[in-house]
Amino acid sequence: MKYPRQFFRIKASVCAVKAVLLSSTIISSQAWADAPNVIEKEKLKNIEVITITNQRHHIGLENNESYAQGKTTEPDLANWLTSVPGANVNTNGPVTGIAQYRGLYGDRLSATLNGHTIIGAGPNAMDTPLSYSTPLIVDAMTIYRGIAPVSAGINTLGGAIDIKMRKAESNNSDDWQSTGDIQSGIRSNNNAGTLSSVVNLAKGDLAGLFYGNWQAGDSMESGGGDTISPSDFEKRQFGTDLRYFGHASETGFSYHYTDTQDSGTPALPMDIEYIFSHRVNFDGHFMLGNWQANWLLGYLDADHGMTNFLMRTNDDPTKYRRNNASATTTDFKLSLEQSFSYGDLRIGVDGYLAEHDSVITNPNNMMFEVVNFNGVEDNRFGAFIEWQQQFDNTQVQLGLRYKRAQANADKVSTSMAMMQMPSDMDMGMDENMDMNSSMDMDDTMPMPTMSELAIDLRDGFNQADRSVTDNNFDIALSIDTQLNELLSMYIGLGLKNRAPSYQERYLWTPMEATGGLADGNTYIGNINLKSETAQQLDLGLTYQSNNVRFAPHIFYQKIDDYIQGTPLGMDEMSASMMANMMSGDENPLQFNNVDAKLYGVDLDGYVQVNEHLRLSTIVSFVRGERRDIHDNLYRIAPLNGQVNASYSSDEWSTNLAIVFAASTDKVAVTNNEQESAGYGVINVDFQYYLNNQVTLRAGVDNIFDNEYRNHLGGYNRVKGSDITVMNRLPAEGMSAWAEVSYNF
């Protein structure tokens, strides 16, 4: 649904927006006392965490540890990660950002909402975990720097992110009282707009929070004047959180609805037609003797449609494709905590049960159908124990987790098995392609038909033993010691494992349903994949005085059985020929186990020049390499960072940011990855506290309208657009934006 631009011209006195000013800080023993709106150390119980907090505008700026920002006109929470050292975003579309941390992304990272595991319906990660929340209802985003503790999630090989969403708050009053926020914002480049509201009602021990959010925008334009099409989006979310507060307990129920409509993903072969999801959560805590028990139970039902013809040009109706995917997830967690003389102890169990289905059809041909994933089960269970103790100036945290992954899939089918010859029912073969091209075959060997290839792949999958169980252990050790008044040191050691994803196991016919890899290659899965095993090391120093902070970390991890696409062998000749026939792919890949390593350095720091002026920086560098052959890992961010100069007073603040990335030729030859050039852009923003209730924010991104391409931005997959197919997508050009918030 499209709204006229006049819809956004709302008077500030009626609908003004809450500014989202974020404080990005490395939490150390000294920083806890200074950082506002940060979860208390006693509750979080971790060594080192980066916390981006959704600051309330009436708090002011004087206590912020460093400057970062998140805009309500940006529909994707993943963009907040660019203010975190070591973190980045793989961008496939405006609402499809995949979190990356130190070169690892996707299922290797644990991304949770209030501790709940979020499993999207899309086999190509169009509905990432962070897409299931919206800026206004975020209280804080926590990213574990270094080795994530075992209690942070089941899959923490690549790190852990948790979104703390706002919950209903009590007021201990005998009368009903209401508080809340209203916010709105606009963005010039793509005529984007947002309108959101949160209301909290409370009386005595009862409280309820209610929210609604609407975001929409047209396609973006690059600095060179090219339209990045389609990058339109429209997204609606609403929900409630109801809570009862007992004497030593709390019980909550929440419901969240997400409705994403026509939203482009130009780096993928299809766009979002719709995503409907219903999420129901229960959570709470209570005392069990001297133990504090924390529990949660969640259910997510997501339905996702995607097409290659509604938002992008497709002149061949025989090649129209619609993919209907669905997923249900039930997740749970129970942990017990108690302090003893020998330290703090936390024990717990957690897990989730997920089921996936995906069927591809052609609306112009009722006979065409490919059952891509059928009744796929991906169930994971874990049990962990974590101990933490303070020894004088040294804090130690040690955790052990056992986890069990059980996977299975029902039989698949395809209408192509009924075909006698390749025809207009094929999977999208280029009409100009010679079916015999790139096939090194004897001229006397008869060319197998599409039907024969489809039957071979289908029967090979259906006759295989598809039930797989992986048993793994994770270990994490973190040591944080205060060397002197100004200097502290961090040492982290980890042994982490990850069982394969369902796409990596059960993708039975060559397709690009790869969890958002977006490299342009078709893949098949491998039921017999082994779990990845990472040996991790992280060393960090933090120098912090009243006016200066400098916190570099160096890291290294050796990953055995890293899951990577590799060229198909002779045993997979049917898949290779099918990939060539379907899409002209001369480099089809299969998920296989290889050996890899990642290493690098990231840092953050600031200098408080005087009472009002602060200079700060974030720098991230990571290299990812294969250990079995001479090649690099795919889609690894090059050296990048930002430098900020921020000025603040009691009533207003401003920030000038230089965002940069180096060029890189360290690309994955196996994935046909392209090199990228470096860039530098300048952003500026301004914030003004009109009064205790109204805050105004405005700014300009890419102020000089530079044409540049982010290495993680993906390749264009859309024919007939301003950008050549398979060229790296450009980033957004100059864009002015404004936000206004009203707090009551």
Image (cartoon, rainbow, N blue to C red):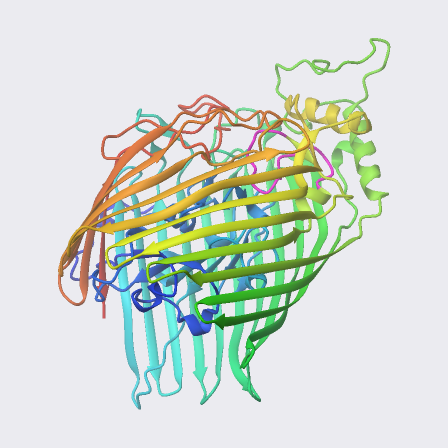
| Residue sitting at x 75%, y 40% | 526
Instruction: Tell me the residue at 44%/79% (across/down).
Output: 243
Res. 615 in view:
yes
Point 40% across, 58% down: residue: 488
Magenta segment's dominant SS is loop
Q: Nearer the viewer, residue 489 or 129?
A: 489
Q: Nearer the viewer, residue 423 or 664?
A: 664
Q: Which residues are magenta?
A: 507-521
Where residue 717 appears, x then y in whole percent?
A: 51, 28
> For residue 679, what is the image quadrant?
top left
User: x, y percentage for residue 648?
Assistant: 16, 54
Residue nearest the viewer, comparing 740 with 86: 86
**Residue at 60%, 65% in the rendered image:** 399
Give the answer, above or below, for where 73 lies relative to 282.
Answer: above
User: Position of 32 compared to 301: left or right?
Assistant: left
Residue 40 placed where, x, y %?
A: 39, 71
Is 573 situated above or below 341? above
In the rendered view, tell whether residue 323 sits above or below residue 588: below
Q: Quadrant of the C terminus?
A: bottom left
